[in-house]
Amino acid sequence: MANELDELTGPVNEAGRDVNVIAKQIPVTVGTGSKVFEVVIWILPIPLIGGLIWLYKKRKAADYLDKLQQKIQHDASQIDNYLEQRVMILQNVARLLDKSINLDKETFVEVAKARGNGDLNGQGDAVENINKAINVAIEAYPDLKAHNEIMDAMQQNSYLQREITAAREAYNDTVATWNREIQEWPTKRIVAAKKGLTTRIPFTTSSEIKAAARGTFF
């Protein structure tokens, strides 16, 4: 039998294709078959036992989804924690630089924006803008690289940047688990449909960051 996706004969998209996250929440639904399934459970030869087992499994599935939902919140909060720490570090660097040079005041506007923005994507973009402004300032004044406080802070900034990346991956992994689990039939899907649950949207980056990633750096 031939492979359904045959990489040897194509078709191949020579132009390539960009990948985007679809920002859409898909509601969980069940059809008539699921409703019939639940009815049949109660009319089995031993209906009481079958029904009680079914109720137990639904309760267990509901508890599991509730806990998974809380984990999504926890993972999102971890991203915010690291972002807040990074803002504080960059804020200190900005103050140190401002003592030595006339740092662009827009940098401090971005600091305020980052501290007040609760959106996972928007907050991250604001922090990246701060980081970019500070890096430009340091490159323009090479002597500042010898400033121990500034260098220590920038090392902490690099560490937190890696932690934010890891936290976003953990968040996306949990979201992927959620999106998969709520569709598992019969128990979880039926419970999710009755609770009106939907899929979750994973972390995405802005079009500006994507464009910058395609740029030439060297």
Image: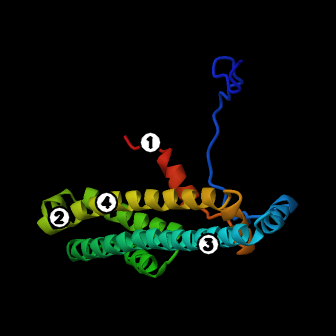
Q: Name the one closer to the observer, 184 or 22.
A: 184
Which residue is label 3 attached to?
62
Determine which of the numbered discs, if any, sits on residue 135 in the image: 4
Residue 107, position as x, y percentages in the image: 38, 73
Q: Work out how far the residue at label 2 is from the one at label 3, CA to CA, in angstroms.
A: 47 Å
Q: Residues within 10 Å of mark 4 (few under 14, many from 20)?
A: few
Q: Earlier in the sequence, mark 3 or mark 1?
A: 3
Type of amino acid at the residue the image marks with label 4: Asn
Q: Residues within 10 Å of mark 3 (few under 14, many from 20)?
A: some
Type of amino acid at the residue the image marks with label 1: Thr
Which residue is label 1 attached to?
216
Residue at x 52% of width, y 66% of height: 121
Q: Secondary structure at mark 3?
A: helix
Q: Secondary structure at mark 2?
A: helix
Q: Nearer the viewer, mark 2 or mark 1?
A: 2
Q: Name the one closer to the observer, 134 or 56.
A: 56
Determine which of the numbered discs, if any, sits on residue 192 in the image: none
Which residue is label 2 attached to?
152
Q: Earlier in the sequence, mark 2 or mark 3?
A: 3
Q: Work out how far the residue at label 3 is from the one at label 1, CA to CA, in angstroms.
A: 49 Å
Q: On the rendered image, what quadrant is the N terminus found in? A: top right
Residue at x 45% of width, y 66% of height: 124
Type of amino acid at the residue the image marks with label 3: Ala
Instruction: From the viewer's perspective, tell me whether residue 77 is left or right of residue 26.
Output: left
Q: Nearer the viewer, mark 3 or mark 4?
A: 3
Q: Is residue 178 above or below residue 1?
A: below
Residue at x 68% of width, y 27% of height: 5
Q: Is residue 141 above or below residue 3?
A: below
The image quarter in which residue 216 lies:
top left
Type of amino acid at the residue the image marks with label 2: Asp
